[in-house]
């Protein structure tokens, strides 16, 4: 499976025709994710918060700083999101269901944004893609407790 095929497959399952018609339970019954391997290093920025004791005030406070992290080539990642902008969200947390760290462009089309056409091309970052399709019956029951 290529990145473009992955994106098409995730969009077809997660955003089927008629979405967001949430009265139709069949439309929310799929949950498509995937595992993949990185073919190159991917860098991303992340905010880190930590507690500090300020010497002057003698009380705790929070400091925030931005750090740059790298997902190394050959690392296994989980694809947890596909957007309508032609990209997918990945995370190094293989147990995650939501919450991505990096967005990877993976369609070979173009989009129109603010009246301008922006070409998109596959990055070729994701390889060895293993799709996962799980029924979301537990989520459907939470969202629609009276549904049969």
Image (cartoon, rainbow, N blue to C red):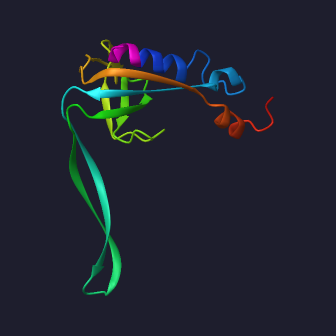
Against 56, residue 72 (above or below) is: above
Q: Is residue 4 magenta?
A: yes
Q: Position of residue 132 (x, y in %)?
A: 48, 24
Q: Position of residue 81 (x, y in %)?
A: 43, 31
Image point (34%, 27%), residue name: 36
Left or right placement of residue 41 versus residue 10 in this view: left
Image point (43%, 42%), residue name: 99
Q: Position of residue 70 (x, y in %)?
A: 21, 42
Left or right placement of residue 66 versus residue 21 in this view: left
* Depth check, front residue: 39 or 49: 39
Magenta part of the protein: which range?
A: 1-6
The main secondary structure of the magenta stretch is: helix
| Position of the C terminus by quadrant | top right
Q: Is residue 57 magenta?
A: no
Left or right placement of residue 139 versus residue 132 in this view: right
Against 133, residue 66 (above or below) is: below
Image point (20%, 37%), residue name: 72
Examine the image and state in which quarter residue 28 appears.
top right
Against 87, residue 145 (above or below) is: below
Examine the image and state in which quarter residue 105 appears.
top left
Count of numbered circles on the image: 0
Examine the image and state in which quarter residue 29 appears.
top right
| Position of the N terminus by quadrant | top left
Left or right placement of residue 109 versus residue 41 in this view: right
* Depth check, front residue: 113 or 146: 146
Q: Position of residue 66 (x, y in %)?
A: 24, 54
* Depth check, front residue: 51 or 95: 95
Image point (66%, 36%), residue name: 138
């Amino acid at each position: 499976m290529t990145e473009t095929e992955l994106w098409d497959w995730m969009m077809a399952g997660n955003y089927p025709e008629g979405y967001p018609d949430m009265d139709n339970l069949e439309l929310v019954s799929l949950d498509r994710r995937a595992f993949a391997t990185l073919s190159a290093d991917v860098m991303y920025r992340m905010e880190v918060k930590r507690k500090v004791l300020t010497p002057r005030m003698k009380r705790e406070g929070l400091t925030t700083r931005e750090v740059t992290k790298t997902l190394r080539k050959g690392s296994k990642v989980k694809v947890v999101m596909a957007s309508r902008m032609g990209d997918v969200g990945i995370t190094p947390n293989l147990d995650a269901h939501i919450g991505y760290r990096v967005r990877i462009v993976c369609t070979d089309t173009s989009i129109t944004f603010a009246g301008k056409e922006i070409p998109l091309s596959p990055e070729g970052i994701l390889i060895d893609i293993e799709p996962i399709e799980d029924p979301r019956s537990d989520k459907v029951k939470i969202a629609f407790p009276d549904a049969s």
